[in-house]
Amino acid sequence: MTPGGEHTTRARILEVAEAFLGECGYHGTRLHLIAQRVGIQKASLFHYFPSKEGLYRAVLEESVGQTEETVRRVLEAQGTPFDKIRTLLESYVDMVAAHPARTKILLRQSLGDAPSEPPHTNDSQRLLDVIVQFIRDGQQAHAFEAIDPVALVLGIVGMVAFFFTSAPVLAPAWCGDPWSTGHAERVKHHVVEVVERCLTPTERPHAAARRATA
């Protein structure tokens, strides 16, 4: 098999494994079914990944890597801090909508459906640090409100996950098809509005008082 062919096969394995892990969870996923859908023998999986746990970690790394690439591209582009926040949020919602299994994997992992040895979180922590630092820089420049940036980012992740998983169960008439373009646009609008309200600097009482007595 050519190097290009091996790369294509590896990417296809990751794509199929992601779908299975999202639908069946780590413990419910069977390697022979992944191999069958890819069109290879089960033994061939181990040419690319040493174990089921190794495949699981590779799926997570692929997800974080793509997200980090998008985040860095947005933050390095031209624009105001709020321009970048809006683009970042819209890009994130697009990624979640394009890869529904990733949100399901995250939720399953939070409930303990993962390898006995939890995956390393260095990549996720690095990605969180990049976004948090961007918000802190904006706060120091008085472009953003002084709120807890870590709590804000985690809240965004939770809110987006909710809109694509639990919201369709609680409010099916409002959501419609949770993975449709229309639903993704509604989620973008709501998330951007909430975050902009959180980050828009508010007038401090003492500052208003100073102006009133000037």
Image: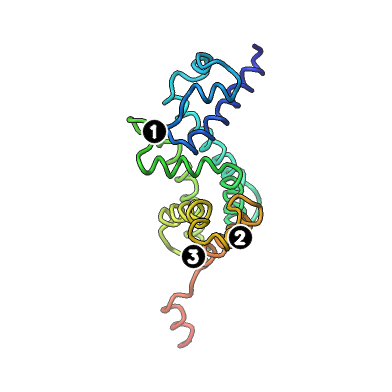
Q: Is residue 137 above or below residue 36?
A: below
Q: What type is the residue that disc 3 sits on?
A: Cys
Residue at the spot of label 2: 186
- Which of pointers 1 and 2 lies earlier in the amino acid sequence? 1
Visible residue check, residue 137: no
Q: Nearer the viewer, mark 1 or mark 2?
A: 2
Task: State the CA–CA distance, disc 2 to disc 3.
Answer: 19 Å
Which is more toward the observer, 170 or 112? Answer: 170
**Residues marked 1 and 2 touching at CB (< 8 Å):** no
Which is more toward the observer, 142 or 6? Answer: 6
Residue at the spot of label 3: 198
Residue at the spot of label 1: 120
* Farthest-out residue, top: 1
- Which of pointers 3 and 1 lies earlier in the amino acid sequence? 1
Q: What type is the residue that disc 2 sits on?
A: Arg
Residue appearing at x 46%, y 81% in the figure: 208
Residue appearing at x 57%, y 37% in the figure: 66
Instruction: Name the element at disc 1.
Output: loop
Q: Is residue 206 above or below residue 130?
A: below
Residue 160 in the image: x percent, y percent? 51, 53
